[in-house]
Image (cartoon, helix red, strand yellow):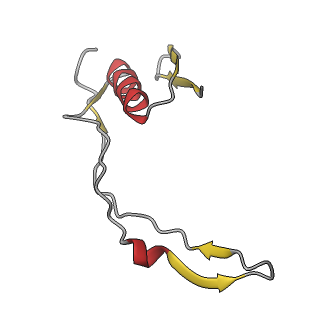
Amino acid sequence: MPSFILTATDDQGVVTTKEFHSDYLTDVVDNTSDFLRGVGFYFNELSVSNESHVKDSELEDTRVDDNSVVFLREKYAIKNDTVYKDKNRDT
C-alpha cells in the first residue's frame, strides 16, 4: 500500500505534516484536500475526474523497437484549475 507524507512550512517556520496510506485515488485526493485546507488554502473542491481530455487515438505511436514493442506517446491534458492560498483567512 502506498504511503504519503505531505509537509508544509509556513512563513513563521511552523511545520504541518500529514501522513497516510491508501491504495485508492479518491482517498489520496480527500487526504490531500484536508491537508491543503489545514495549511490555509481555500478552494471549492478537489476531486477525481474520470473524464478523459485525451482521445485514445492520440496516444497511439507507430514507433516499434527491434522486439516489436509499441511505444506510447505521452500527452498532457490542459488544466486550468488553480488553487489559491487565502492569506486573509484564519485556519
Q: Which residue is most to the left? A: 44
**Which residue lies most toward the bottom here?**
62
Taking the spot 38% from the left edge, 63% from the top edge, the residue there is 77
For the residue pair 80 and 86, the one nearer the viewer reads as 80
- Apparent side of residue 86 relative to residue 27 in the rendered image (left or right): left
Image position of 77 (left or right of 49): right
Q: Nearer the viewer, residue 31 or 64?
A: 64
Which quadrant of the figure has residue 70?
Answer: bottom right
Residue found farthest to the front: 68
Position of residue 36 measured from the top left corner of the image (x, y, whole percent): 37, 27
Q: Position of residue 15 (x, y in %)?
A: 53, 15
Quarter of the image for the C terminus: give it: top left
Q: How many marks?
A: 0
Q: Is residue 47 left or right of residue 32?
A: left
Say which of 30 and 56 sits in front: 56
Q: Residue at x 50, y 13 (%)?
A: 14
Which of the pair 12/59 is nearer the observer? Answer: 59
Across and down, in percent, residue 18 comes to 50, 17
- 39 to 58, vertically: above or below: above
Residue located at (59% from left, 28% from top): 2
Quadrant holding the N terminus: top right
Whether 38 is drawn above or below 44: the answer is above
Point out the residue furthest to the right here.
66
The x, y position of residue 12, in whole percent, is 48, 17
The answer to whether residue 10 is left or right of residue 4 is left
